[in-house]
Image (cartoon, rainbow, N blue to C red):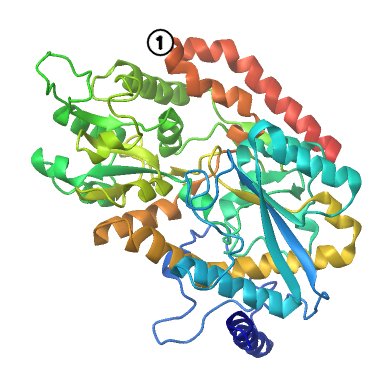
Amino acid sequence: MNKRFYLRAMAWLMTALMLLGSIALTSCADDEPQDPDTPEDPGTSDGSDEAGEDTRIPLDYLPQATYGGLEINVLEWSVSGQRPGQSWVPWEDIDVDSGDGDPISNAIYDRNGVVEETYDVVITKEYIDVNDDLLTTAVRNNEATGDLAYQMITTRTFGIKALCMEGLMANMFEMENLHTDMPWWNQDSVRSYTVGNALYFAAPEMLLRDKGATAAMFYNQKVASDEGIEDLYALVESGDWTMEAMIGHSQDVSADMDGDDLISSGEDMYGLYGGTGDLPFFLYTGAAQKFAEVDEYGYLRLTFGDDEDITIWQDILDMVMYTDFYYFNKVDTTLLPTDYNVFTSDHTLFYAHMVKEVLNLRNMESDYGVLPVPKYDEYQDDYSSLVWMHHDCVLGIPASCTTNQTTVDAVSAVLEHMSYISYYDVYPIFYDTIILGKSARDEQSKEMLELIFRTRSFDPGQYWIPKETEHFLFIYSNGHKNVSSVWASVETAFTTGVEAYNNLVDELN
């Protein structure tokens, strides 16, 4: 008996015993759904209470059925041919070839073994680029030919609009095996991706890349120590980690170091490095704002445009365009050729990027800490961490699968079961081993990462009307100085985009 079969057989036996035992429980998933507004923190939940008793929600609603070796092929998105371990695909989250790798690969291998043995299916994957619309074209062709080449697909949210509006994706709300109110489905993603009465994409906990695409702030502990800056974690915990605090510390440390009386070269000290042009979006979401929301009927509602929104964007614009302490677009990039060198070489205090940037920082000589994106001000209730649409990952089921009920039943059961195991068994290992064990260097950074993941936020305006919201990504690089006047020039485009989207929702539903 080979190792993989043995592991799967044992895992299947344990799962079967758990399912049989759960039948006697009086509380089931349908009777007591999880509160969708309760923050999820699977990173600290292993399904046991302090007494060691199993407190996992039973999976007794899933079918006790097998599917004759059915292949469930997942089409995964990539960029420029990248594969796991590279920038666009930092981690594999669907399938691995071996159980002899790092802890997270072993956990995924074991998870898939349980699911494959339970339902007699084979889980496979293949990558395709989102460049040049290749992924969308592949899904279109799959629908046109009806060959069921892909049973699930992942993509970044920047590209989901066409897939949904062209009727290429199945409504996951209609699949009885999928209980999207459960904690292994991120509830903000379920709300934000709802289209009328349908859910075509979401972020179940089996995905890891959406977590890596969450906005965060890193700070250089050597620079902080040299400048006498103490206990930034205490600022976060007290609720006083705000844009004003970030700007104040950034101004304090920025300095001319090469003697030319300017803060403009790679030798100077900066307070903040943005890493990418995405920082304004990170800070806007950090202010607990969204461009749009999905209402209770599944329609898009524009939320940008009042005086508060304009003020917040103006403050962000002024910071990135007119301050010396902010590094982005100020220095010849040939001096510091990579995003993170300015941080790792101790030339800046703060570094705004995404959680996955820890992969580039793990060999950094100086210690670093992790912080959430700051609040706009101290009156804001909580921190808010954007899941960035260009790097994240969502999952859906192609509409072509609905032509065969057996396929629908199998795919939905597999998806639910994989997400369930990921929530209890894979994500905690990912969190402790990949993020914390090899990256963050102090216990308080661990607490900060827990806070960041607890406050993940999806902005429907960014992917349902992407052309309109993308305008604000470039506003500061095009010489515009007044957000109010810019908004006056584009407001009609925003409202028209929302109306057009809602008309398509009516047609789909």
**Residue 146, horizontal then vertical, whole percent:** 90, 50
Dot 1: within a 10 Å radius of its alpha carbon, few (fewer than 14), some, or many (20 or more) residues?
A: some
Q: Which residue is mark 1?
A: 481
Above or below for 239 versus 468: below
Q: Nearer the viewer, residue 483 or 147?
A: 147
Quadrant assignment for the N terminus: bottom right
Residue 306 percent location from the top left of the image: 51, 23
The residue nearer to you, when weighing 305 against 161, is 161
Question: Does any portion of residue 373 appear in the rendered image?
Answer: yes
The C terminus is located in which quarter?
A: top right
Secondary structure beneath dot 1 equals loop
Query: Which quadrant of the structure image shows residue 428?
Result: bottom left
What residue is rendered at 71% in x and 37% in y?
A: 134
Residue at 64% of width from left, 78% of height from top? 114
Residue type indicated by callout 1: Lys
At horizontal 25% and vertical 43% (from top left) the residue drawn is: 219
Question: Does residue 428 show up?
Answer: no
Residue 473 % position (x, y): 49, 24
